[in-house]
Amino acid sequence: MATESSHSIIYTNEKSEAIRVAVVQAEPVYFDLQGAVGKAIRIIEDAANQGAQLVAFPEVWIPGYPYWIWTRGCDIEMVQRYIKNSLSIGSDEMKRICAAAAKNSITVVLGYSERDGNSLFLGQCHIGSDGVIKMKRRKIKPTHMERTIFGDGGGDSLLNVVNDEKIGAKIGSLCCWEHSQPLLKFHTHSQGEEIHIAAWPAQLPHEEGKGLWSTANEGSLNLSVTYAVEGGCYVLHACSIISKNCVDLMKTHEGDQYYASGGGGSCIIRPDGKIISERLPDDVEGLIVADLDLNDILRSNAYLDTQGHYSRPDLLWLGSDTRAKPRVRPDQYERALIVTNDNIPVTRSLVRYLIKYNYLNK
C-alpha cells in the first residue's frame, strides 16, 4: 500500500540561472476533498522546502482519477460521491491551495476534477507564486470511458501556456491522451512553451491482452518523450500511483488496466527527449526534483524547431477558435452573418474580402 512519504530524487545543475522544479508521484485521497486538499498543501510545502520554484501534479489528482470507469462504465453511486468531492474553481478549498502557493512562494500546476454546478471537467490550473490563478483549462476531449463522467473543454482551454515572469519561463499544460492529438500539441507548441506539464493518472506496465500498449505506463512515457522532442521543451511527466486499497475501493480487480497496485512513473525529460531524472519505484510516493537549464532548449532548437526554421507555414498551417462559448450568450455570432440573395449565410469579413479582391460586386 502506498504511504505518504518524503522520498525525493534530485538532479542538480550548478548554473545560477537554473530553474528548480518538482514533479509529484503520489496517491490521491479518494472521495475526500478536505483530505485531498490537505495532502496537496503538504506536498507543496515539501517541494518548496527543497528549493523548487514549480511543482507539477498528475491528472485529476484532486480527488483522484475515477479508475472504476474502465471496469464498469456506469456506477451512479460512485459518480455521486465523486461529484461531491470534486473541486470548484472559486471554492474555499481552491483558495486554501492558492494561499499555500503564496505562503511558500512556489508556482503550482494542479490537476483536479473541476465541479461546475453539477457537471465535471478534467481541469488544470496554473497558480502563480503570488497565489493568483494565471490559467485554468479543461481537457478538450475526455478519453473514451472518461466521457461517462466528464464534459468537453472549450476554445479558451487552448490558451494553456503562461509566461511565468517570476520563474522566467513559459509553462504549458496538457492532460493524459491530449498528448496524442497532433493539432492540440502543435497549438500548444505555438505559444512558445519552455516547460510543459504532462499530467497523467497511474498507468500499470503493459500486459498483453489487457488494454493497449499506448494506454499503459510505457506508452504514456513514449508520448511525453515525443512531446519534448517535437516541442523542443522540458516535460514534467507527472503520474499518480494506486494502492491495493484503491483497487479494493473502486472494485477494479477484473478490469484491463487498473487491476493491481503501482502505476507510478514520474520523471523529467530534456528537450532532446532524454530522461534526465531517475525514477522512483512505481508504488512509492515522493518528488522528482531537477534543475533545468533553458539553454538546452536553444541546443535542441538549433537542430529542430517545429515553430520556426523546421516548418512550412506556406504549405501547412493550423486554424483555431480560442473563444469561450457559454450556453447562454448574446447573438453576436448571428449578427456577424449576412444572407446573400441566394439565401447563403456568410460572414461580414468574408464579404469584405470578396469585395476587396473583386470577387463580389459592391
Image: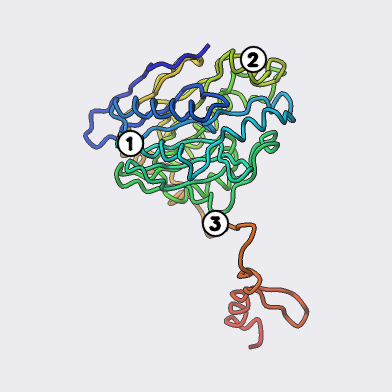
Q: Amino acid at mark 1?
A: Ile
**From the viewer's perspective, is residue 237 above or below residue 161?**
above
Numbered disc in front, either 1 or 2: 2
Q: Residue furthest left?
A: 16
Residue 106, labelled with which disc? 1
Q: Nearer the viewer, residue 309 or 296?
A: 296
Graded by Cα atoms within 10 Å as few (under 14), some (14 to 19) or many (20 or more), the crowding at tag 3 reads few
Q: Disc 3, disc 1: CB below 8 Å?
A: no
**From the viewer's perspective, is residue 319 above or below residue 172?**
below
Residue highlighted by disc 2: 248
Residue 102 lies, in percent from the top left, at 32, 39
Graded by Cα atoms within 10 Å as few (under 14), some (14 to 19) or many (20 or more), the crowding at tag 2 reads few
Q: Amino acid at mark 3?
A: Thr
Q: Nearer the viewer, residue 19 or 336?
A: 336
Residue 34 lies, in percent from the top left, at 49, 29
Residue highlighted by disc 3: 322
Determine whether the residue tagged by mark 3 lies in a helix, strand or loop.
loop
Determine whether the residue tagged by mark 2 lies in a helix, strand or loop.
helix
Separation (CA) of disc 1 from disc 2: 35 Å
Q: Amino acid at mark 2?
A: Asp
Graded by Cα atoms within 10 Å as few (under 14), some (14 to 19) or many (20 or more), the crowding at tag 1 reads many
